[in-house]
Amino acid sequence: MPDLPKAISNPQNKGVILTQVKASFNGPLPPPDLLRGYEESSPGAADRIISMAERQLAHNQTLQTRMLEATIADRKRDFAEGRLGQICGLIVALSFIAAGTYVASTGHPWPGAVIGGGGVGLQALVALFIRSRAKSE
């Protein structure tokens, strides 16, 4: 009969207790005991594992920095784009109002009022567009 543990091979025992141990780790480095085992089985393995973890950490930090810089640049570009839209909208609206005022002052009050009112309406439309775009981002 092969070598079985006494609890299994002894007929007087009525039950068997089995214990299962499961171990896991999370992170770039294994626990010290496991790292020690790697080093014993392959000299220099612990140093390679630690340097691999350090390189991975540096790589992740570089990626996070680049992502943050890209996000900041994107926000600055959006702000500048919105500001440019506001300025262009103001110029167009003021041009319509000036043209309406000129047309009204030359003796055509109704067409002048329509053109000037269109400038005010256009300004409101531009402001609405800029606000809705900012909320959607």
Image (tube, rainbow, N blue to C red):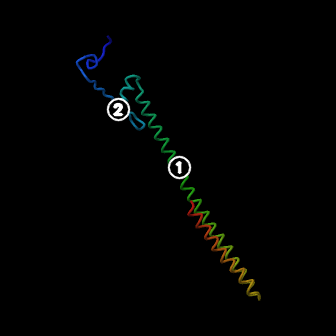
| Percent of width and height locating residue 42 | 41, 23
Q: Quadrant of the N terminus?
A: top left
Residue 117 numbered mark, or none: none
| Percent of width and height locating residue 59 | 50, 41
Q: Amino acid at mark 2?
A: Pro
Name which residue lies at 40% across and 23% down.
43
Image-based side of 4 in relation to 117, left or right: left
Q: Amino acid at mark 1?
A: Met
73 over 93 or under it: above or below = above
Nearest the viewer among 123 and 105 is 123
Of the residues under marks 1 and 2, which one precedes in the sequence?
A: 2
| Percent of width and height locating residue 87 | 63, 70
| Percent of width and height locating residue 76 | 56, 59
Residue on which the image places disc 1:
67
Q: CA distance from mark 1 to mark 2?
A: 33 Å
54 over 34 or under it: above or below = below
Residue 32 numbered mark, or none: 2
Name which residue lies at 57% across and 56% down.
74
Nearest the viewer among 134 and 69 is 134
